[in-house]
Each structure stands twice: as structure tokens, then as C-alpha cells.
Image (cartoon, rainbow, N blue to C red):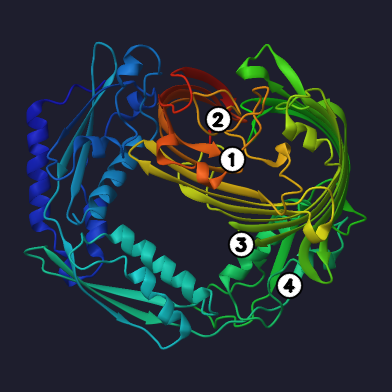
């Protein structure tokens, strides 16, 4: 059993540390040596291994020697941190010391200081045992040294196209900014990937540091680029397919033998194959060892595509909660039978029966039917030798009561849609839709609803453009979502309705400390092509509710009919701002502000009519998405009474 370390032991360690620094040669004589000197030659007191195997609980963390970086920044990089106030209340488990955690923490802190330009930073972590309760006290001593900033940055490169592309990455290294070796490594990897995308995967980047070993205040950097030989793709072999025809996989490749080598094309090929939905795994690998620089580089490497196939036929039953543009909380169930790889050709067909319900006024005990739908769908992934997934779909919805208006409707629809993808973030949909709708109006008080009764056939063209860079669509913490939706009905297409519609939205997600700052702007406009055919109520805009302007009942913001039911607007604008913060376990807390309105005509739009709601919410991040409870209070409520409202829904509002 080891004895507690006395205070003078720490003093001896500090003296040894300073002595080691004085005897160790500086990095000026050997560029790059400073990194190993800061980590590998650090004197560290080894803790009691037998005691650490029992994973003792952490009682306290003591940090000394830090001047430029706060204790909060240091704690944020460590695994071994004591329990928080919530842990003290028993809401969180006591943190324990895991295997080799102290070594990982030391490395993480050294890298933290390196990112801030402290190239000489040294870290000592001591773990002391408290005898009476066997818990641990973590002591962190930091010798920061002097901060080093970038001086001149000289680049010696070739005259290739790739050389002209790497300057956008080298601009990350700013004159006078902290000399960050972590950022430098990332920058060189980005430069190397750029060269590899232009047929130069053997490009080498040699760096030379020029640092005054006495002052350590400025680092002059020289980067020399050796492009290496030009490489082209060789032959490609397909492996692992027993049901799928080889040519169906080969056509998804973004390159052919003899094409200039590109890592971007390799990644694109893998994504194309996986997105067909026919495989659970796909990997594109080089067959020969073309990465060894000890032998002659392979200038035409052969590749192999390895896949693991999914079963082509399936029967799927699904149920769950969700939300849409007009409903706070919905629940649906569906049964689908189909194939994702018909006869090994990649073609898909499916038969589906689906029912969806909505919670009335957000109540979990009061539900009403939205629709029953029966669908037959067929998808052709390639048309005329072009990757253009084309889907033909026929659907039937028997008589059901509208969730918004006082009528019943029956709908038969046919749709032909085309999908174009560009990379992983950009998509476009183009659809031709024919709808045959039968209305059965209950209310005789609304002229608009009576007009809808004459709208039996609607033909539409829709075009949707989308760019989605969110890494996680359920709980987005970064990236953005931009979408433009256009719709044209009637006119040269024929039918009983004629209008055009445009909806644009943009949402951005940014991390600030542990919180996510989310912003959304959304606008829309719809107008008839002629006064003889007004825009049907089902194609107008509806605002209010958990997904637009909270504090109001769903769809109750905007124009209303003679009987008081919402009739929908022709123009709307909404702005949402949220600060989302994780609190405990899987619970999040949100502060939000919603602003906007819904109008029938552009001349009705006035700044004094803008509605403003402020509120708070709590979310539970379940495996299927956040379950959300929001409270909104009307702050500016022109034309509406001062009130508030609770909203129960699923997923974040945007």
C-alpha cells in the first residue's frame, strides 16, 4: 500500500522538471524534435497500478500553474474530472479513473496548449489516494512556457493545378496567430488530399521550423512540396455480389480504367454504391501495395469493390410519432411489402398501406384520423444510361374528414418524380402530380369552401432544391439546411385549379460552448393564375403551432373563414431563434423566440402585424428523435388575445 504524497514531493518533482528543461537541447537544432521533447521526456510520477485497477472514484481536481488558459478550458479536455453539483445530488454517477486515463489526459492537455501556441508546455499529473475513503485527488501542474506565433510562411511548390488549389488551406496559417502544430498537421493533410484529387497521391510535404531557442516567440515555417508521379486508375474487380449483376454495381463507379486518380472519385463511388440501398456494406480498396515509397510507385493501381448484399425482398411494419407542417403531433403506422433489388437489376417496387392520426390540440388522449392511404410504387434507378432515379407512384385515400376544414374528401393521385444528387449534401426533386379529389362540404357558410367543392382535378409540377450539411438530422449541432420549393398547378397542365407557389427556408446550427444556437428563416408565397380559379384552401399556408409560431393553436395564425375556421393565407414569413443546451442525461433545455405572421394579400403586410412569442422548452432525446414540450407566451399579439400555450411534439421545431 502506497502512502500519500507529501507536499515537498511535489516541490521535488518541479525542481526535477526545471532541471530537465535546462539540460534538454532546444528544437532549433532539429526541426520537429520539440514535440517528442514535450511529451515523451516528461518526468511523471507513476500511480499505484493495483489501486488504479479498482477504478477509484474521483474526489477532487487541483490545477496549478495555468495563466493563459482557464481552469474550465483545461477541465473540458480531461477525462478525470470530479463530480458536478448534479452528481453530488445523486443525479449522475460518480466519475471513476479508467485505465490509462491519466496518460490520455496528459497528452490532451499538451495538445491543448500546442493549439494555443505554447510549444514548450509541460504537464505533470499526479494521482493521490485518500486513505479513509479510497477516492482519488487529481493534481495537474502546468508549466506553460512562452507563446509562439507564426512568422513568415514560405511555400515551395510545383506549377500543377493542385498547387494552385492548396492556398485556400494554407490561408488558415495567419501571420501573428499562435503557432498551432495541430492546425498545421490538419492543413497539410488537406493539401495532400487536394493533390490526391488531381492524380498525385504520392505528393510529399516537408516542413522546416525556424525557432529562436532562446526567445521562442516567433516560428518561421518553410513548406516544400514534392508532387511525385501522376497516377491513373487501373482495373476494377467486383467481389461479394451473388444476386446483383456485376454491371449494376460497375455503373455506380464515378471513374473508369485510365481515369486520372482522385480520392474524391473513390469516395463518390462508394457513396453511389451504398445509396442504391441494395447493400449493407461497401468498400473500395486498392489491390496492390501502391502506398510504399521504398519501391517504385504503382502508376495504375487496380481496385476491388467489396460489397455485402441485403435481402432483396422485405416486409416492413413501422409505427411512430412525428410532425408535419400543419400538425403539432402525429402518429402513424404502415405495412409495406416490396423488393429493393428486383431480379438483381437494382429496380425497386413496393405496396404500402398507411394510416396517420393527429393529436387534437396536442392532447395525448384525443386523436383523430388524418388519412388512410394505399400506395403502389416503382423506381427505376437509371434512365437512358443516366443515374436519374425515377419513381412512378399511384395512391388512393378513401373518404376522410379534413383536419383543418369542414369537409370530407377522397383522393386518387398519380406521381412521376425524378431525383438528382450532387455529392452528399445537394439534392433536387422534380415531380409531375395528377390528383383527382372529391369534396363533400359540411359547412354552407364559407364561400371559399364551396369553391373548393368544384376543384376535382389538380395537375402540378413541383421542383425542390435542397442543400443539407447537418451531420445529424435528428439532433443537429452544426451545419445548415437550405431548401427552395416551387409548385405550378393548372395553366398549360389543365385541371380545375391554377396557381403557383414558392417556399424558401434556411436554417443554421452553431455550437457555443455546450449549447447549440439554431436559427431559421422561412417565407412563402402562393397566388392564383386567374381570378376564376382561386387558390384552394388545402394549398394555402397555415401558421401557428409547435413548428412555426408557438403560443398559438395549430393553424390558427392568419386569415379565417366565415365560420371561424382557418382559411389559410397566400403569403407568410417566420423567423425562429433557439438556444438548445444539454442539461442532465438525455434532457435538453431550450429558450426560444418565434416571430412572423400569415396574410391573405401582400397589401395586408405591415410591421405592426408581426407576432412575437417567447418561451422555454424541455426535450428528451429518444432513439427516434427528441420528444419536446414547449411553453410559448405571446408578447406581441396583434389581433389575438394575450395568452400562452403548451405544445407537445416530437423532433426539434426545425
Q: Nearer the viewer, mark 3 or mark 4?
A: 3
Residues at marks 4 and 2 touching, judged by CB atoms closer than 8 Å: no
- Residue 522 in picture, x, y percent from top left: 52, 45
Q: Is residue 330 at all visible to an observer of this figure?
A: yes
| Mark 3 or mark 2: whose residue is earlier in sequence | 3
Residue at disc 4, secondary structure: strand
- Mark 4 vs 1, N-terminal side: 4
Q: Is residue 598 left or right of residue 443?
A: left
- At horizontal 84% and vertical 39% (from top left) the residue drawn is 454
Q: Determine the CA span between mark 4 and mark 2.
A: 59 Å
Q: Position of residue 118 (x, y in %)?
A: 18, 54
Task: Kindly identify the residue that appears in the image at 70 percent across and 41 percent down.
Answer: 539
Q: Earlier in the sequence, mark 3 or mark 1?
A: 3
Reading the image, the residue beneath label 1 is: 600
- Disc 3 to disc 1, how far (Cα)? 39 Å
Q: Earlier in the sequence, mark 1 or mark 2?
A: 2
Residue at the image position 84 percent from the left and 45 percent from the top: 311
* Distance from Cα at disc 4 to Cα at disc 1: 59 Å
Residue pointed to by mark 2: 557
**Seen from this angle, which residue lies furthest right?**
343
25 sits left or right of 138 in the view: left
Mark number, residue 423: 3
Marker disc for residue 236: 4
- Quadrant of the frame with the N terminus: top left
268 and 205: which is toward the camera: 268
Amino acid at each position: 500500500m502506497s502512502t500519500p504524497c507529501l507536499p515537498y514531493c511535489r516541490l521535488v518533482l518541479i525542481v526535477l522538471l526545471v532541471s530537465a528543461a535546462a539540460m534538454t537541447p532546444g528544437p532549433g537544432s532539429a526541426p520537429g524534435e520539440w514535440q517528442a521533447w514535450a511529451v515523451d521526456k516528461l518526468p511523471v510520477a507513476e500511480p499505484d497500478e493495483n489501486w488504479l485497477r479498482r477504478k477509484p472514484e474521483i474526489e477532487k481536481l487541483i490545477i496549478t500553474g495555468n495563466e493563459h488558459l482557464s481552469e474550465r478550458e483545461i477541465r473540458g479536455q480531461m477525462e478525470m474530472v470530479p463530480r458536478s453539483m448534479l452528481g453530488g445530488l445523486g443525479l449522475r454517477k460518480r466519475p471513476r479513473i479508467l485505465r490509462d486515463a491519466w496518460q490520455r489526459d496528459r497528452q490532451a492537455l499538451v495538445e491543448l496548449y500546442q493549439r494555443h501556441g505554447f510549444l514548450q508546455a509541460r504537464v505533470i499529473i499526479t494521482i493521490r489516494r485518500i486513505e479513509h475513503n479510497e477516492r482519488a485527488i487529481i493534481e495537474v501542474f502546468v508549466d506553460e512556457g512562452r507563446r509562439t506565433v507564426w512568422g513568415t510562411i514560405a511555400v515551395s511548390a510545383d506549377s500543377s493545378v493542385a498547387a494552385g488549389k492548396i492556398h485556400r488551406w494554407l490561408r488558415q496559417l495567419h501571420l501573428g496567430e499562435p503557432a498551432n502544430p495541430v492546425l498545421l498537421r490538419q492543413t497539410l493533410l488537406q493539401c495532400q488530399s487536394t493533390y490526391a484529387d488531381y492524380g498525385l497521391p504520392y505528393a510529399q510535404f516537408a516542413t522546416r521550423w525556424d525557432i529562436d531557442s532562446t526567445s521562442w516567440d516567433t516560428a518561421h515555417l518553410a513548406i516544400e512540396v514534392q508532387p511525385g508521379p501522376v497516377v491513373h486508375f487501373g482495373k476494377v474487380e467486383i467481389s461479394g455480389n451473388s444476386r446483383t449483376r456485376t454491371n449494376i454495381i460497375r455503373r455506380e463507379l464515378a471513374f473508369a480504367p485510365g481515369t486520372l486518380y482522385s480520392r474524391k472519385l473513390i469516395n463518390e463511388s462508394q457513396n453511389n454504391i451504398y445509396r442504391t440501398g441494395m447493400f449493407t456494406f461497401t468498400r473500395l480498396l486498392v489491390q496492390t501495395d501502391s502506398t510504399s515509397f521504398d519501391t517504385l510507385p504503382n502508376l495504375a493501381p487496380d481496385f476491388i469493390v467489396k460489397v455485402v448484399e441485403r435481402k432483396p425482398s422485405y416486409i416492413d411494419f413501422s409505427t411512430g410519432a412525428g410532425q408535419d407542417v400543419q400538425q403539432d403531433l402525429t402518429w402513424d403506422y404502415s405495412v409495406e411489402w416490396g423488393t429493393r433489388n428486383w431480379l438483381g437489376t437494382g429496380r425497386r417496387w413496393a405496396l404500402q398501406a398507411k394510416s396517420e392520426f393527429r393529436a387534437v390540440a396536442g392532447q395525448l388522449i384525443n386523436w383523430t384520423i388524418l388519412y388512410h392511404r394505399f400506395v403502389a410504387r416503382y423506381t427505376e434507378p437509371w434512365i437512358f444510361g443516366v443515374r436519374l432515379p425515377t419513381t412512378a407512384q399511384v395512391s388512393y385515400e378513401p373518404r376522410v374528414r379534413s383536419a383543418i376544414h369542414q369537409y370530407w374528401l377522397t383522393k386518387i393521385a398519380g406521381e412521376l418524380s425524378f431525383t438528382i444528387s450532387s455529392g452528399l449534401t445537394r439534392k433536387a426533386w422534380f415531380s409531375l402530380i395528377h390528383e383527382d379529389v372529391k369534396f363533400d362540404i359540411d359547412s354552407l357558410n364559407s364561400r371559399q369552401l364551396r369553391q373548393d367543392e368544384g376543384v376535382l382535378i389538380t395537375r402540378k409540377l413541383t421542383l425542390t432544391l435542397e442543400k443539407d450539411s447537418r451531420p445529424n438530422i435528428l439532433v443537429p449541432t452544426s451545419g445548415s439546411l437550405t431548401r427552395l420549393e416551387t409548385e405550378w398547378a393548372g395553366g398549360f397542365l389543365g385541371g380545375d385549379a391554377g396557381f403557383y407557389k414558392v417556399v424558401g427556408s434556411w436554417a443554421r446550427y452553431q455550437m457555443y460552448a455546450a449549447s447549440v444556437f439554431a436559427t431559421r428563416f422561412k417565407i412563402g408565397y402562393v397566388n392564383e393564375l386567374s381570378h376564376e380559379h382561386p387558390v384552394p384552401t388545402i394549398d394555402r399556408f397555415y401558421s401557428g403551432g409547435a413548428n412555426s409560431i408557438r403560443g398559438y393553436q395549430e393553424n390558427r395564425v392568419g386569415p379565417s373563414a366565415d365560420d371561424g375556421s382557418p382559411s389559410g393565407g397566400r403569403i407568410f414569413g417566420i423567423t425562429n431563434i433557439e438556444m438548445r443546451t444539454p442539461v442532465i442525461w438525455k434532457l435538453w433545455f431550450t429558450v426560444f423566440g418565434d416571430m412572423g405572421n400569415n396574410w391573405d394579400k401582400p397589401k395586408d403586410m405591415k410591421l405592426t402585424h408581426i407576432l412575437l412569442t417567447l418561451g422555454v422548452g424541455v426535450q428528451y432525446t429518444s432513439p427516434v428523435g427528441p420528444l419536446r414540450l414547449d411553453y410559448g407566451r405571446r408578447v406581441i399579439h396583434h389581433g389575438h388575445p394575450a395568452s400562452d400555450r403548451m405544445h407537445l411534439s416530437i423532433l426539434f421545431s426545425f
